[in-house]
Image (spheres, grey):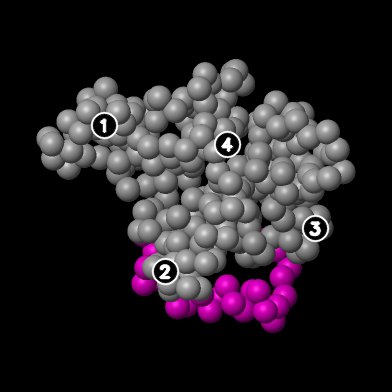
Amino acid sequence: YHPSYHRSTPDTVWDILDKYLQIKDRNSINPKMFNSFIDGTKSGIEMTAVCNATGLVPQSGGLSFPPASRFELADICKPKSDGGTLEKAGVTEVVSSVDRDERDVPHHLAMGTYVVFEGETDYARRCFREYHLLPDKSGKYAALYRPVHMIGLELGISVASAALRKEPTGAPTGFRSDVVATAKRNLKAGEILDGEGGFCVWGRQTPADVSLDRDFLPLGLAHGVRLKHDIGDGQPVGWADVDYDATDPAVTFRREMETAFGRRNAA
């Protein structure tokens, strides 16, 4: 992640993607989909799913993507009150594999996953070191990580677990986090939004109550709709800013979801 990546488009994504993933046949992949991985959208969607299924909450400004190596996770992804970067405990964050000067972070975790947790007892904190976890300097927090994630293989396990044992990998328990359409550049009235990974907007993780209170347009409905107003670079798009079809099944379902879960469960 780098702040400039929010402006990435399907035409420019290769300039960034080639640094991390060499694809010989560029026609074999969908650049729009891969661009959503680069511009911050996919991270926002994934962490929103985590929040809504686990009880974690988004930070007020969404993901900040601090640079971190796998050995620094517990020092960086802990609350600011304890010397880290997080707004508070119990939130989601994604770390960057490049620093703000776009230099590679040594031992980065670009293709991996991680979790940072706090030891509630002295015994648990001693175990962090004794069992070779990756604790922070204080020993209060520790991290676990996987260097890779194999999406297709993991999906099959989730499907089998849900179908055979009735055990979901994740299931929504409340509407705590949303993904809001955010302008990649100065957008003009009359433009047609092209959704996730496109040329117009990226998806910012946002607390659901903020999204609902301010009537922000969810990223999933920011495709094929015409802008009614100009939107400045980096600004959220609202429902009132687009000409949408209120009878569209996706719009109807979204409104039903807001009624069912929104005010009762928003963080």
Q: Residue 143, how many percent across, how many down?
A: 35, 35
- Left or right of 252, for residue 31: right
User: Mark 3: which amino acid?
Assistant: Ile
Q: CA distance from mark 4 to mark 2?
A: 27 Å
Q: Is residue 58 visible?
A: yes
In this picture, which residue range is highlighted in magenta? 241-267
Q: Residue 161, how many percent across, how many down?
A: 47, 66
- Residue corresponding to mark 4: 111
What label sits on residue 213 in the rendered view?
A: none
Q: Is residue 195 on the magenta stretch?
A: no
Return the disc, 4 or 3, that comes first in the chain's sequence.
4
For mark 3, give the secondary structure: strand
* Contact? badges 2 and 3 (CB < 8 Å): no
- Left or right of 18, for residue 25: right
What label sits on residue 167 in the rendered view?
A: 2
- Residue corresponding to mark 3: 192
- Residue corresponding to mark 1: 131
- Relative depth, front residue between 54 and 257: 54
